[in-house]
Amino acid sequence: MSNQLSYKQYIQEVTLWAEQLETLLGEMRTEDNEAKKSKNEISDLLNLLNSFENEIQYEDIVSIKEKVDILYQDSSSILQTNRQTDERLNLYNGIKIGEHKLPPLPYSYDALEPYIASEIMELHHKKHHQSYVDGLNKAERMMEKARQTGEFDLIKHWEREAAFHGSGHYLHTIFWNVMNPRGKKIPTGKLLNKITEDFGSFDAFKQHFTEAAKKVEGVGWAILVWSTRSHKLEILQSERHQMLTQWDTIPLLVLDVWEHAYYLQYKNERADYVQNWWNIVDWNEVENRFKEASKLQWKPF
């Protein structure tokens, strides 16, 4: 693909993203200064994108990327705050038994390339994650049936199925959202301070998390959690989805090291996959999860 075609495709993608963001902000209930600022930034960006009629220069693309980065940072916290406010106001009733659904990805299947190939993302999301949703729904319905009939001969099996598929569904839902091609590349603020306090430094945390992911025995996850009991951050391994976990903790950052997450692209080089994964971590999402999770603090023992 020539540079001009690549540049035009990028401009089309950014235009679509900006228009979608404009719609989201337009639906917000707030009109504070930060929201107005982001709306003005979107308007300026769209005007710039629509002004390209002749040959596009590399410098133009650099300028667009700078504006996109600024707009992404400014709008992310606003949208997250508004989403959390809406959730508190709506007081969702939760998922009915056996009605879990596959969540949509917050980006296209090829958005994380070259670090994670489009083919892997599509298979991982459409096939593997969907199978966990289906398995959880079936387990919930079978346990409901057991309660209705009073026949609990297979309850041990369905409890195991619910633990496996439920954990797989919930961890994958977090996994998709802690990655973003335009995500924040390093934590800041309270989360960075807490990482430094609990691990010594961000580099020490990153090395610990990386090694934990590389050394998961068999298949499973590396997970950064908030411990509501000890009031600190911890790194855990989980075999499969649900084994070797620790109760009373809240996952903040998760990395899937099942072979289906990387084998098509990295073969048996799990270490390369783990190392490259850091390029697409979105610390905005992790910071937002930490902000909410750290509000929950049980009495330490």
Image (cartoon, rainbow, N blue to C red):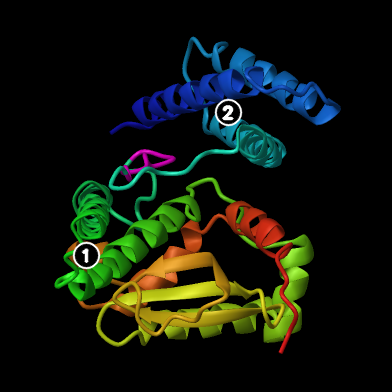
Q: Where's the C terminus, which quadrant? A: bottom right
The residue under the point 58% across, 24% down is 24
For this orientation, the residue located farthest to the right is: 33
Camera-nearest residue between 5 and 270: 270
- Name the image quarter holding residue 36: top right
Looking at the picture, how far across and down is residue 251, in whole percent?
53, 67
- Name the image quarter holding residue 165: bottom left
Q: Residues within 10 Å of mark 2 (few under 14, many from 20)?
A: some
Q: Is residue 203 visible?
A: yes
Amino acid type of the residue tagged 2 in the rendering? Asp
| Residue 108 higher or lower than 208, as above or below | above
Magenta-highlighted residues: 100-108
Numbered label attached to residue 246 = none
Looking at the picture, how far across and down is residue 247, in whole percent?
51, 78
Q: Tell whether 194 sits left or right of 99.
A: right
Q: Where's the N terminus, which quadrant? A: top left
The residue under the point 72% across, 37% down is 74
Count all numbered tags in the image, as a single digit: 2
- In this figure, which residue is indicated by the disc labeled 1? 260
- In this figure, which residue is indicated by the disc labeled 2? 60
Q: Tell whether 172 sits left or right of 181.
A: left
| Residue 166 higher or lower than 127, as above or below | below
Distance CA(mark 1)–CA(mark 2): 39 Å
For this orientation, the residue located farthest to the front is: 150
Q: Secondary structure at mark 1?
A: helix
- Name the image quarter holding residue 25: top right
The verdict on residue 74 being magenta is no
Our reading of the magenta stretch's main secondary structure is loop
Q: Residues within 10 Å of mark 1 (few under 14, many from 20)?
A: some
The residue under the point 32% across, 63% down is 168
